[in-house]
Each structure stands twice: as C-alpha cells, then as structure tokens.
Amino acid sequence: MTRKQAAANALGLQRAEGLEPSPEHEALAARWVAGEIDSEQFKQLNLEQVRQRLACSANRARQSAGDYTESGP
C-alpha cells in the first residue's frame, strides 16, 4: 500500500466515524505522503498537534467555567 492510499484510507475511516481532520492534520498528512517526513516524524508531529488541541480545549473549558461562575447562573 502506498502512503497516498494509506492516507486516503485513514481519512475515510475518520469520516466514517463522523470525524473531520483538522486542516493542520491534513497538511501534516500531505507532508508525509510527499515523503517530506518519515513515519516516525509523522507520528510525533501528529501527537504534538493532538496535545495542542487538547490543551486549547481544556483552556476554553476552564475559561467558560470561570465566566459562568463569575456571572452566576
């Protein structure tokens, strides 16, 4: 299986689960397909993207909770 086929299969599986990859992930996958980065680099960079998204989500949740408690119900 080529990298292009593997990326297309992974994208299809994500969409079948009702998920949509971020533009950042699509750009990273394109770099992997083009051979700019190897599989290990792809995994590491992908994990970093996930960590950043989770951190941003957690910060937004904390901010929303703070907004709610400051303004009251």
Image: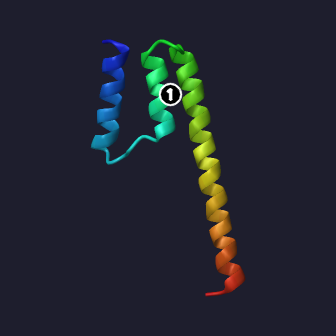
Residue in view at x 67 percent, y 75 percent: 67
Secondary structure beneath dot 1 equals helix
Q: Nearer the viewer, residue 60 or 36?
A: 36
Residue in view at x 44 percent, y 33 percent: 26
Q: Residue 35: horizontal and vertical position, in percent?
A: 47, 12
Q: Image height check: is 66 above or below 48?
A: below
Using residue 3 as the reference point, say whether residue 62 is left or right of it. right
- The quadrant in which residue 20 appears is top left
Q: Local crowd at mark 1 within 10 Å, few (<14), some, or many (≥20)?
A: many
Residue in view at x 36 percent, y 24 percent: 7
Q: Please state the total of marks drawn on the protein image.
A: 1
Q: Image height check: is 14 above or below 30?
A: below
- The quadrant in which residue 5 appears is top left
Using residue 40 as the reference point, say whether residue 71 is left or right of it. right
Disc 1 target residue: 28
- The kind of residue tagged 1 is Leu
Q: Image height check: is 20 above or below 44?
A: below
Q: Residue 16: horizontal and vertical position, in percent?
A: 27, 42
Q: Image height check: is 10 above or below 41?
A: below
| Residue farthest toward the bottom in the current orientation of the protein | 73
What's the image's color scheme?
rainbow
Quarter of the figure that contains the N terminus: top left
Quarter of the figure that contains the C terminus: bottom right
Residue in view at x 68 percent, y 84 percent: 71
